Amino acid sequence: MAGVSSQPGSSADSAGESGSSGEIGSPGSTGSSDRSATARGQRPVWSRDFGLFFVARAIARLGDTMLPVALAAGLLQHGYGVGAVGLAMASTAAAFAGLVVFGGVIADRFDTQKLMIGADLVRLGTQALAAVLFYSGHVVLWEVCAIGFANGVAGAVFQPGVASTVPRLASDIQGANGAIRIAEAAAQLAGPAAAGLLVGFASPGGVFAAHAATYAVSALCLLLLRLPPLAPDSGPTGHGGSAFRADLVEGWREFRSRTWLWGVIAVWCVYMIAVWGPSVPLVATEVVQQHGPRAYGLVNSALGAGTVVGGLLALRLRPRRMLRAGAISLFVFACFPASVGAGFGVPAMAVGAAVAGAGMSFWSVMWATSVQTQVPPDVLNRIHAYDVAGSLAMMPVGQALAGPAAAALGVGRVLLVAGAISLAIPVALLAVPAIRNLVRADAPRAGAGMRGTHEIHETHERECPQPG
């Protein structure tokens, strides 16, 4: 994944409608243009159904950010060490990363709304079971890991459907992604604090119970959604193992055929190994050791606040070449690891974190919108699954290398190197013509089928020839 959550990160406006030929663009149209868009049958961002989806994503994200606190506090209380906490978290991550590609195929073959509701109900059950285990005091590590693995499998089924749901809910896909990014950032700020309060006043079991409740709310909101029907021929046909394998191969072929898509993922693998992977644990270690946990909380809050600002900018600005504008915004991410590595004071580190969060959030929305508007709807779930899997694959490698690198060079030097490499990442993105020249495309209207989307893609190919 690319945003601040580590995934590379949609706009419905075409090049002609963006209102600007510059790289950052001009504010989106308002007033009479919104009314005329509605008159043409386009869906505004803030409809009843998008509001339900917005609440579902925000509440679920709130619960997800509470989980690490609950796992750490609960397992440590019952005599387990830091390694056990890491193993419990890894069980979820491994299941998700290993199965999300298959989840993309499933999401393209079946009703994504029902799949997402089912996944939420599974996680409601597993987290309720975890709450019972922690409340009763019967905490066995393998049982906690098994619950985490089941959550990862459910997440792998849920996540691919998110990409195809947004274009069905709003014509302004960039605005929709920006709003969701803001909600997720706000939840990321509130979740750990809420979990800390629940652990203090109740127990870790109370956090798991609250987490289960967030999935119940999400499932209810998704159940109430009224999604427009897809075209009859908009999904894969055929049944059985051979058809499943054929769909998997087709998804890979579609992914590989788009240079801008696999090019970003290839660069992002380097980013995860050399920048994000080591920065997360090393920043936490360095700030806590040098300035205390409260300072680390302040720096994290600044990162989250910057993420909200980046989401607001993404709501306002409409660049014609979205990935170019997003890549330019990534230059400021260097401020985060570099400010910590250079040994600056807490205020300077907080400013660096806020600026980095804004740049990463803006890129995240540009990326998500590009994928959702440039990829045909019948393969979008599979493409998104390859995107997520490719983005996450190298993060554990970066985290594993952080310790040996810090032991050899020192934490400060490793973070300074990460800051320098983070400047090279947008340079690499901008060096690829297929990435920097990708022109924004209109999102196909729900139910429009394949023809309109292929016409959009063919227009892009004429305007932006891909190398090789």
Image (cartoon, grey):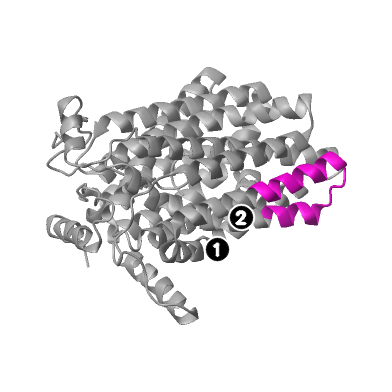
Q: Which residue is painted at 71% across and 35% down in the image?
A: 207
For disc 2, the neighbor class at 10 Å (few under 14, some 14 to 19, many from 20) is many
Residue closest to the eye, 264 or 79? 79
Closer to the camera, 389 or 449? 449
Q: What is the x, y in percent for residue 414?
A: 55, 41
Q: Main secondary structure of the magenta part?
A: helix
Viewer-closest of 431 and 91: 91
- Could you tell me the amino acid type at mark 1? Leu
Per the rendered image, the range of residues in magenta is 124-148
Q: Are marks 2 and 1 in contact (CB under 8 Å)?
A: yes
Indicate the amino acid at tag 2.
Gly
Relative to 353, residue 111 above or below = below
Q: Is residue 229 visible?
A: yes
Callout 1: 10 Å neighbours few (<14), some, many (20+)?
A: some
**Quarter where residue 406 is shown:** top right
Residue at the extreme top: 347
For residue 152, which numbered disc appears in the image? 2
Residue 142, magenta (yes or no): yes
Placement of 377 over or under 135, stated as above or below: below
Q: Position of 73 compared to 248: left or right?
A: right
> Which quadrant would residue 107 be assigned to in this image?
bottom left
The disc label shown at residue 76, or none = none
CA gap between label 2 and label 1 equals: 8 Å
Disc 1 is placed on an element classified as: helix
> Which quarter of the rendered picture does the C terminus lie within?
bottom left
Task: In the rendered structure, find residue 99 and report the number of the disc placed on it.
Answer: 1
* Residue shown at the point (33%, 55%) measured from the top left: 229
